Amino acid sequence: MTVWSDCNAKQSFGIAKCNFDQDTKPHRLNLDVGDTVIILKETTHWYYGYRQKAKETRGIFPKSYVHLCEYNIVNGEYCIQRTDIVEEITKVLLEWGGIAKSYFLSTNPNFQKIRRKINELNNNRSALISGNLPLDEMRKVKLQATAQIDTGNKLLGLDMVVRDESGDILDTNAICTTELYENHVNAVQRIEKANRLSSDRDLGRGHNKYSHNILLHVNAFVCKFMEDSDLLFTLFDGDTHKPISENYVVKWSRTGIARDIDQFDNNRVLFTDLSRNDLSISKMYLVCYAIRIGSMEVKDSMESKRTSMSIANSVLTAASRKHSQLSVNSNGSGGSTSEYLMRRPFGVACKDLTPIISKPEDFRGNLDLPFIMCEKDTLDGTLRKLIANKDIDKIESKMAVTFEVLRGDIKQIKEDFPRLVHTNVPVARKMGFPEVILPGDVRNDLYLTICSGEFARIAKTSEKNVEVTVCVANEQGQLVPGVMSIGAGHAPIDEYKSVVYYHDDKPKWQETFKIHVPIEEFKQCHLRFTLKHRSSNEQKDRSEKPFGLAYVRLMQANGTTIPQGQHILAVYKIDHKRHDKTVANSYMELPATTAELQGTKPSIPGLSLLPKDQLTICVNLCSTKLTQSVSLLGLLHWSAHKETLEQSLNALSLVPGEEVVKFLQDILDALFNILVENDQPEKYDQLVFMSIIHLIETVSDLKYQHFLTVLDVYINESFSATLAYTKLMDVLMRNIRDAITPSEKSADGIELEESAAVRRLYKTTRYLHYVMKFVIRSRVLYAAMNCNTDYVDFATRLQELLKMFIDMIGCPSNLLKSEGALLKNLHIIATDLMEVFDQVHLSISIVEILEKFPKRRLTQSKMGCIKDFVETKLFSSPKCRAILLPVFCKHIKDHLESNDEGDSKTDIWQQEKNLSKAAKVLGQKKSHLHTRETTANKKIAECINIMNNILRLLYRSDVGPTHNDVRDIMIILLRQVMKAAHALDRDTGVVGQFIAIMLGILQRMDAQHYKYFVNDLHQQGELKDFIIEILLVFEELVSPHQKAVFPRDWMDMIMHQNTVILGALQQLSMVITDYFLCPVFDKQIWSNFFQCSIAFLVQSPLQLNDFNDNKRQIVFARYRDIRKDTAKEIRKMWFQLGKHKPKFVPQLVEPILEMSMIPETELRRETIPIFFDMMQCEYYSSRLELESYGDTKHNNAHHKGNFSEFKTAMIEKLDILIGAGKGDAEYKELFQKIMLEYCAAHNTLNVDGTSFVAMVTKLMDKLLEYRCIIQDESKENRMACTFSLLQFYSEVDLKEMYIRYVYKLCALHMEFENYTEAAFTLKLHTELLRWNDTELSPQLRSYRHSNCRTHRELKEALYFEIMDNFDKGMQWECAIDMCKVLAQQYEEEIYDYIKLAELLKRMAQFYEKILKEMRHTSEYFRVCFYGRGFPRMLQNRVYIFRGKEYERHSDFCSRLLVQHPQAELMQTLEAPGEDITHGDGQYIQVNKVEPIMDAAFAKFNDKIISNEIVKYFTSNNVQKFQFSRPFRDSTNGGSMDDVRHLWLERTELITQFPLPGILRWFPVVDTHTFKISPLERAVEIMKDTNKDIRQLVIVHQSDESLHINPLSMKLNGIVDPAVMGGFAKYEEAFLTDEYLEQHPDDKDLIEELKELIAMQIPLLSIAIRLHRQKAPDSLRALQDHLECCFSDMQQHVESRYGRKSCDLKIERDSVIMRRTNSFLPALFDSSNNRLSETSMGSSDSGLSKSTFLPRPPTNSIKSTLASLSFNTRPLGHSPSTKGNKHKDKTPAKRRSMKKDRDTLSLPVANCQWYTPPLTTITSTPEKEINSSINSLASASNSSLSGPKTPDPRVLTEELTPKRPLRSEKDKERRLSRPASIATPTATIKAFADTRSLSESSNRNSVETTDSTSEEDIRPPPLPAKTRDSTDFSSLTHSLDWNPNGYAMLNVLSNNTTTTTTTSSSSTTIMTKTSSITNSTYEYLEATNFSLPGILDASKPRPPTPPPKPMRHSKHIP
C-alpha cells in the first residue's frame, strides 16, 4: 500500500520540466513544460498537488518531471525565490515587452534598440540564473545588466533607478535628501556614460593619468637577409636625439623569422613609465637598429627577399636554432672560438609617432617603418639621414608593426587588457624616473652609452676595426656575471660587445645598454672596457688580441655614485708579454679618466698610457638607493662632520627631489637628531626646522606625492624624537612672532618688500599640519614615557600657540597667504590636536580664529576651511558641534547674502538670462556654450557643498543627538535657502541642490522644531512672510506651469519631495489655525494654503491611476498613497474656517473641484461634501458687506438667499476641468448621489439644491460627451456636441461660456468651410450686443476683435465679418439683411455717410450677385441613427442634413459611412424593430427630402419675377420638409394600371431650427404623415406643368441667347404626349360623371383640374408662338408639327372647359424685367430632370419641386439632347478628316481628354449652361435619325396613356446590394449623362425602348423621392460595372455641334410614327434587369444598355465625360 506523507515546506513548489499527459489513467494531473505546481503530499516516486493556474484540479505526477525551487509567497501567490537583480530583470522585461510591441506596431525608430537591449537582458538573466558564474564574473554581469536597464529606461522615458556602486537599488528611506539628490545626479552621469560607451564594452575604470604606456607588436620585416640579425627597438626623442626607453631586442634569423623560440609569434613589448611630458614632445620616433651578426663581409647568398608574414606557420630549422643559441650565449662575444662572428651595422628603421599618439584611433592596423641600410655609415648617422629624408615614404624595405597607447600603471593594464598584455610580455622601462615615483618602486639601473672613441695608428697603415667589450668587475678584477642587458626580450649577458665599424679610427657608436648591479655589490664594482681590432680575415682575426684597456669606478671616494653625464676614459695599451694576468685588478692603480691624468703618463708593467687614444662614455643612473649628492651624504653623516653641518643643512635645498625621497626616513632621523642634540639651538634650530619644511615640501610635490604615505608611516611608526615637540613649537611661535612684527615701510607707508620672516611664515603655514603631526606625535611619545606629568605646561604652550594664530590673523600686516594656508590646514591640525588637547577648548579656539577674520577677507578660504571641518572627527562630537555649527551656519548665511560686485545671486540669474539669449541667437543648447565660472557660482557651490555635508552627517546614527543641531540650521539657514531657491532661475543647475537642502532641513524638523521656529519668527514679526514664502515655494515645486526642478523620471526624488512637503503642510496647517484664524483672520495665508495644498494634491506624480502596474506597486510600497492624507488635511482646514467660508466660495471652487475629480473613490467622498457646504455658506451669507456668515447679530432678512456665485463658478470650472481631461462618468454619478443626499436632508436647500445638482449633472454629461467626441473624426459629432453645450449655456444664461462656445463652433465651421453656418453662429454673439457706446464687459469681449471696446464697435465689426462669411457662402440675401441694419445705424443713428456710401456699394454688389452669379441649390436628406452604438446624442434620433454643393444621395451616404465606419446603411424606409433600436449596433437610414418654402414667401407666386430671386427662398430659411412614397390602392378592385389607384404616402417633417442655420443639420421635432389621393396628385402635376411653361416663356423672352432645345422638348412632350398620354389620362380617370358620382367630395378638385387644363392652352399658345419666332429653318417641320397638334388640343380643351386668357404677352416689351444670360429654365432643374411634366414627371409637387435654376453641373436630359450635334453634311459622310475608309480599322490609341474635347467641338459662345462633352455618335442614315427622334416625341406624349403594369412579383429572397440604392435624383442624373456605354441616360433609353419608364415603384426604397410618375414605377435595371472593360481608345468619329439647331429635325414632319427602326449596321445591347420586389412594391434598375440605331457595336466607344466644374464657375469651356 502506498503511503502518502506531507511534503517538506522547502519542497512544496516546483516547475514542470517535461510534459506529462496521462488522461486515460485516474487521478493524474496533466502538466506542460513551465507549469508552476504546488506540492501537497509525496510518496516514493510521486507528488500530489495542483497547478498554480488551476487550483481546483488536483492530482498526482512523477517526481522526475518536476524541478523543485525555493520560493516566496507574494500576495498569496507562490513565486520563485531569486536574487534581487534577477527579479528586477524579470519585471523590466515584462514592462518593456508591452512597450516594445507598441513600438513595433507604430514603427517607432527605437524599436530595434530596445529589442537588442531586451535580448541582452535576457542573456544576462540566463547567465545569472544558471549559477555557473564565479563571484567576480557575476558582479560583472550584474553591472552590465543594470547598465542595460538604466539606458533602456532612459530610452523608453521610464523612471530612473537610483543605485549604489555595486548596482543594487538604493533604499531611499535610509539616506538623507541631499544624498538622494546626489545619487540621482550620479545616476544621470552613469547612464550618460553607459550610453557613450555602449559600443565599447570597457566599463570605464579610472586610469592613472600620470602613467602612459605604449604596446608594440612586431609583425613583419620585409628585407633581404643574408645572416642573422638583432633588431633593437627603442623610443627616441627627436629633439635631443637621445633614446627615451630601454631597447627591445628581436632576434631575427636569416630565414625571416625569430631566432628565439620564446619570441615565436610573440614579438611584442610594453614601453612603460612614460609621462605626459614624454608624450607631448614635439618629435617622438620609434627607432629600430638592425645589427647583423656574422663575418666582417656579407657572404653572398642566393636567398631572396623574405618576410615574416607567416611566422606562425614556420618551423625553426636546425641551423637557425644553432645560430639562435650562439647568439643567446655569446651575443657576439664568441662563446665558441670556432665561430667567426661579430656585430656589424645593417640598417635603421624609424617612424614618427607624434600624430599617432595624438589620435591613436586614426591609426588602427599595421604601421610601416621605412628601413634603409647603413652602407658605410654608422647606425647613428644612418638614423639622422633617415629622419632628414623627405622621401621617406618611397622607401621599399619596411617593417610592419602594430602600435597602441595604453593609459594606467602596469598593474591596471594587465587587469584591463589581459589579452594584449599577458605575463610573458617583456617590459621596456623609461631610462629615467617616471612622473610619479611609487614608494615600492625600487630601481638601481645604470644606463651606459658607449659614445665614441679615438684611436691612433701604431704599426698599422690602415684604420682599425675596433670592437669594445664591456664587463662589470669587482675589486679583485673578477667579472661579475649576468648584470648586463642589451634590452628587454633578451637574456642577461656577461659582456657587451659593440658594433664593429670597418676601418674607422674614430668610431661613433652611440650604443646604450643597461647594467643592473645589486646594491650591496655596487660600491665595490667598476666597469672594464677592452678594445680589440677585428680582422676581416678569419684566420688573422683568431690571432688578434686586445690592444687597449680602460676602466671606470661606479662609486667615488666620497661615497657618491659616478656622476651623471659624459666621461672621457684614458686608454692604456696592453703589452701582453709584460702584463701579469695573475693580478687581474692591477690597472685600478692607474687614473681612470683623462681628467685624473693631470698631464702625467702613468704606467705599470704591461699597461702604458696611449696619450692620443680615448674612449667616451655617458652614464645615466636611475637608482632609488644610491645618491650622487655630496651634500646629502654630509647631512646623513653629520655627527662625523659637524664642522660642515651648517653647510649641509643649507645645501639640502639644492639636492634633487629624487635623491631626497630615496633617503627620506634617513634624512628625517638625522634632522630630528640634530634638532634635539645640537649644542647651538639659536644657530641650528631654525635651520633644521626649515630643512624639515623643505623635506615636507619636496614630498608634497606632485611627482613624489605617493611618498606622503611613506612620511605618514614614518611619523606613526618610525619617529622617536620625544623632545622635539618643545623645540618645534618654540621655532613655530618665533616664526609667527617675527612675521607679525611691523616691518620697515617707505615714506608713503608702503612696505618696501616682503620680508624674509613673512616668506618663512608662509612656507611654514603651508605645511603646518605636518609640523603639528610631528609635535603631537612627539608629545604622545613623551607623555607615554613620563605618564603625561607635564600636561598643563604643554596645554598652556599649545594654547599660546593657538593664540598666536589668532594674533596672526588680527595682524594688520600683509599675511594673507599665510592666513590662507592656515585656514587650509586648520581642520587637519584640529583633528590631530584632539589626541592631546581638550576638544571643547579646541573648538572654542577654532571659532575664535574664524571670527577673527574681518568680513570679506579670505571668504573663500574660510568656506573651504568650514567645509573641511564638517568632515572631521571633531565635528562628529556633539559637544564640539554645538559650538561649531552655529558659527558655520552664520558664515554660510553671510556668504549667501553677500552683495559684492559680481558676487550675488542676481548676477547668476542675469548671467543665465544672457546665456539663454545667446543660445537662442546662436541656435545652440545653452549647455554647449562656454561660460566662465563666476565668483558667485563658486560661492554658491561652496555653500551647497557644506550644507550637504552637514545634513548628511546629521542623518547618521553614530554622531549622537542632533535635535539642537537641526534647530540651529533651521533658525539660521532655512529661510535663506528658501529665498535662494525661489530667486534663482530654474535653468541654473544649483536650484535642484537648494531645493534638496531645503527638503533635507524640513525632513529633519519635528513638531518641536516647528513650534520653536514659529515662536522665533512670531517674535520678530516675520511669521506671515515665512508662511507665504514656504507655501509659494511648495506650490511652485508641484505646479505643472513651472519648469520642473527635478526631471520627470526622477521618481524617487519627486516622491520623497512630496512626502516631505506633506509633512510640512500638516505642521503648517496647525500654525495657520493657531495664528491666522482668530482673533485676526488672514485671508491671504488661508488662500495660499488651499491653493498650495490642492496644487500639491492634483500634481501628476501623485496620480497612481495613471501609472502602469509595476510603477504603481513600487510607489505604493515605498511611499503609499499620500493623496488621502492631503485631502483630509484640506477638508479639515475648510471646516475650520467657520464664519470665514464665504470669503473663499467663488475662489476655491476650481481647486477643490479639481481635487475632487481625482479618480480615487475615498478621496472623492471626502471632498464632494465641501461643495454642499459652499452652497450653504453663500446661501446664508449676508447681503450686507459689514455682516457675514455666522455673525451673532445675524438677521434672517439679510440672508443672500441664493448661491449664484457658486453656481456660476461651478459651471465655468466644470467646463475647464472636464475639457482638460479631469473627471469621468463615475464622478458624475457619485457627485449626483452625494449632493442629492445632502440636499434632500436640508429643508431650505431641498428644491434649489436639487435643481442645481440636476443642472450640474446634465452639464457634466454634456461635457463628458463633448470631451469624448471633440477628437472624433466626424465633424458633425463635434459640431453637435459644441451646439449642445451652446444651448445649455444659453439656458443657464452664462454669457462668457456661451460666447466661448459660439466661437468654438464658428472655428469648426471655418475649418470645414461652412461659411454660411459660421455667419449664423457669429450672429448669436451680436444678439447679445446693443447699438450703443456702452463699455464692453469682460464676458462679452471677442478675442477676434480684441481692439473693440464698446458694444457698437464690436457689433459693427462682427456684422462685417458675418457679411463676409455670407458672401463666401453665397447667402447674399442674408448679407443684405445685415447691410440694412447697418445702413439704418449709419443713416439715422451716427450719421456716418462715408460708411453708408461704402455699405450701399457693397449692398448693390450683393443684389447684382443674386441675379448674375451661379449658385447651387442645396439638397436635404433625412438621416435616422438607429442603435445604441452611436454617441448618446445620436441614438435613435432623426435629423435633416443640408448637403454639400452638388452632393448626390450616394455621395452623401458614402460620406456618412466614412464618418461612421461601424454603421450599416439600411435599404428600406420601414421603421426598424427594437432589436435594432435597442441593440448595440449602428444603423443609418438615409433618404432625400424636399424643402417646403415658407408661407411668408407666397407673395412671389403671381408675379413675373426672376427665378434667381425665388429659387433662394425655396431651399433656404426652411424648417419644413417632405418626402413621399407611392403605393397603389387596389382595395376597390380597380386595375393596378389605373391612375385612379396610384396614391402617395407623404411625410412632413419639422426641424428644431430653420436650415441653413448654425449647423448643417438639425433634429426633427415633429413628423406628420398623410396620404395624397390620385386626383390631388393630378392637380399638383398640372400646376407644376403650367408653372414650368410660364417660366419657360418668361426665360426665353428675357434672354434671346438661350437655346431653344429645352422649349422644343417641353412643348413636344405636352402637345404630342404619344405613349405617355398627357393630361388625357386624367380626363379619362377623373373628369367623368362616374368618378364624380363615386367621389362627390372631390368636386372642388375636379373643377380645379379642369381650370388648370384650360389655363394650359393660352400658356401653350404663347409658348408655341415664341418657339416659332426663335426656331431656325431646320426646325420648321417640328414647328409645324407642334402647331398642328396644338390646334387639335386647343379645340378639344376649349370645347370642354372653355377659353381662358393669360397675363403673358408674346411681345418682348411686355416683359418688364431683365434676365441674365446665366438663367436656365425650371424644366432642367436638378430636382426636376424629366422629359415632360406629364410624362416623365409626377403630379407630386413635393417630390418634384419645380425650381427654376438647376445646378449647372448636373447632367440632365438636356445634356444629351440639347448638346447633340447632328452633322449638316450629306448623309453617310463621316466627319473624320480621313473619310469613311478608316472607320472599321483597328482602334487607335487613346487620345488625351483635351483632344477629345477638341474633336467634340463644343461651342460656348451662345450657351451659358453646363453642357458636358457628349458621346461621339457616328453619322446615321436620315431615316434612322427621324425614327429615333420620333421615338423621343412618342415617349414624351405617352404620359397620359399609362401602359399596363405587370403583376407584382413576390420577393422570396432578400437581396442586399453591394452599394446604396440610387435615389430618384441619382437616376435623373444618370439619365442626364452623355450617351455612353458606361453611363446610359434616359434619352438613350428613350431611343432604345418606347415603353413607359414608370411601370412600378419601390415604396420602401431609401432612394424614393417625391417623384411618382410612371418613370418611378419601373426603374431602369442596375448597370453592370464596366469601368474595367470600357475602352475609349478606338474613338475616331464625332458629331459637330451646330448652334443653329438640330439639322436632322428638318424631316420630322415626314416621320410621325412611334416605331423605332434599327439600322442593319447597328447592334442592340440587350437590357439586363434585376428586380427587388416585396409583397407590394418592385425595384428595377438598369444594368446596361446603349443606343440602337445610333451606336454600333463595332464603332468606337465614347470618351469619359469631363469632371464636374468648380464651384462658382459660369461655364465650362
Image (cartoon, rainbow, N blue to C red):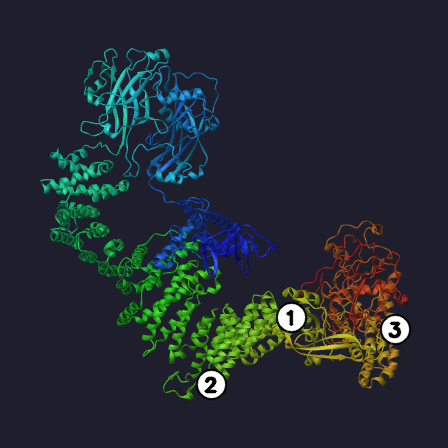
Please rate how many residues cluster around mark 2, counting C-alpha atoms within 10 Å: few if below 14, some from 14 to 19, many from 20: few
Element carrying mark 2: loop
Tell me where residue 1681 sits by quadrant. bottom right
Q: In this view of the protein, can residue 1045 be seen by the observer?
A: no
Element carrying mark 1: loop
Which residue is nearer to you in this view: 1225 or 1894? 1225
Q: Amino acid at mark 1?
A: Gly
Disc 1 or 3, which lies upstream in sequence? 1
Tell me the number on the disc at residue 353: none
Q: Position of residue 897 (x, y in %)?
A: 28, 61
Cα–Cα gap, marks 1 and 3: 61 Å
Disc 1 or 2, which lies upstream in sequence? 2
Q: Is residue 498 left or right of residue 921?
A: left
Tell me the number on the disc at residue 1685: 3
Which residue is nearer to you in this view: 1025 or 391? 1025
Cα–Cα gap, marks 3 and 2: 87 Å
At horizontal 77% and vertical 52% (from top left) the residue drawn is: 1929
Tell me the number on the disc at residue 1244: 2
Quadrant location of the C terminus in the rendered image: bottom right
Tell me where residue 281 sits by quadrant. top left
Q: Amino acid at mark 2?
A: Thr
Location of mark 1 (residue): 1479
Q: Nearer the viewer, mark 1 or mark 3?
A: 1
Disc 3 or 2, which lies upstream in sequence? 2
Q: Amino acid at mark 3?
A: Cys
Whether tag 1 and tag 2 are in contact, CB under 8 A, the answer is no
Q: Nearer the viewer, mark 3 or mark 2?
A: 2
Q: Position of residue 569 (x, y in %)?
A: 25, 22
Please rate how many residues cluster around mark 1, counting C-alpha atoms within 10 Å: few if below 14, some from 14 to 19, many from 20: some
Q: Nearer the viewer, mark 1 or mark 2?
A: 1
Element carrying mark 3: helix
Q: Is residue 602 left or right of residue 545?
A: left
